[in-house]
Amino acid sequence: MSVKPIREHAGKALLEKLLPEISGGKHKMGHAGVLVTPSVLDSTSNGSWDKILEQNPWLKTTNLVAKPDQLIKRRGKAGLIAVNKTFDEAKQWVMDRMCKEQKVEHVTGQLTHFLVEPFVPHKQEQEHYICMLSHRYHDEILFYHEGGVDVGDVDAKAERLEIPTGEALTEATVTQKLLTKLNPAKQGNMASFICSLYKFYTDLHFAYLEINPLVMLDDNTV
């Protein structure tokens, strides 16, 4: 079966829409943000900055994160994430890079799509890593309790859980197999979130899903 990549913004928009229902109201996704395209270079287009701001007035009332949304890995390491910026600062950061060539590791290309989303203040120890991927006869979940830009080699460090195709996932199994290094006070809510995320993953026929960082705040919201 063929697999089609989607943008981070598209994935977050799906989570924002469907996660509350899938989780029975236990979990929700924050605002998916806005996708900024080369249309901002044309002040008369429907994708201009004025139109974006008109449709998303919250951009002026909260600090923001801006980053390319083009399936680029290790954006933080490449200096391609602007954090805790005002709208004007995020706008300028995007405009300085829009349709400009950028080298990331060994690849050079144009940056044409950016995600601008709300900044969520948090501590380093609240950052975790999760990845779900599908194999021929089973799915696999990788979880590491220390996520973020310096997560390192997750293939070597992460806890792993295999789920045979068609089998249900339980919170008890998630806690036992994936969360032994996580603060016990956080394990219950994280297990519930992972089960809901896996249902989202299977219901929408994803083949790969990665979140880094996956942030759990002090009140245990994810």
Image (spheres, rainbow, N blue to C red):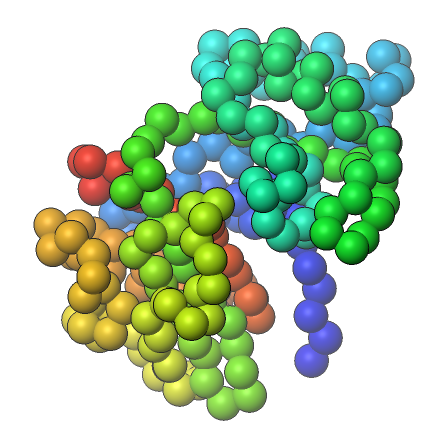
Establish if 221 lies above or below 97.
Answer: below
**Which of 204/76 is in front?**
76
Residue 96 in picture, x, y percent from top left: 77, 21
Residue drawn at (86%, 19%) of the image: 41
In the rendered image, the quadrant that contains the C terminus is top left
Seen at 18% across and 36% down, the residue is: 219
| Residue 129 image position (x, y, % from top left) | 40, 55
> Residue at 68% across / 51% down in the picture?
71
Q: Is residue 88 left or right of residue 121?
A: right
Closer to the camera, 59 or 143?
A: 143
Q: In the image, 62: left or right of 161?
A: right
Q: Residue at x 68, y 50 (%)?
A: 72
Quadrant in the picture for the N terminus = bottom right
The location of residue 60, given as percent across then percent down, is 54, 10
Q: Please tell me whether residue 15 is drawn above or below residue 38 in the rendered image.
A: below
Which of 102/28 is in front? 102
Q: Quadrant of residue 5?
A: bottom right
> Can residue 131 be seen by looking at this rendering?
no
Residue at the far bottom in the pictured view: 137
For the view shown, which residue lies furthest in the left direction?
A: 185
Given residues 210 and 105, the one toward you in this image is 105
Number of numbered discs: 0
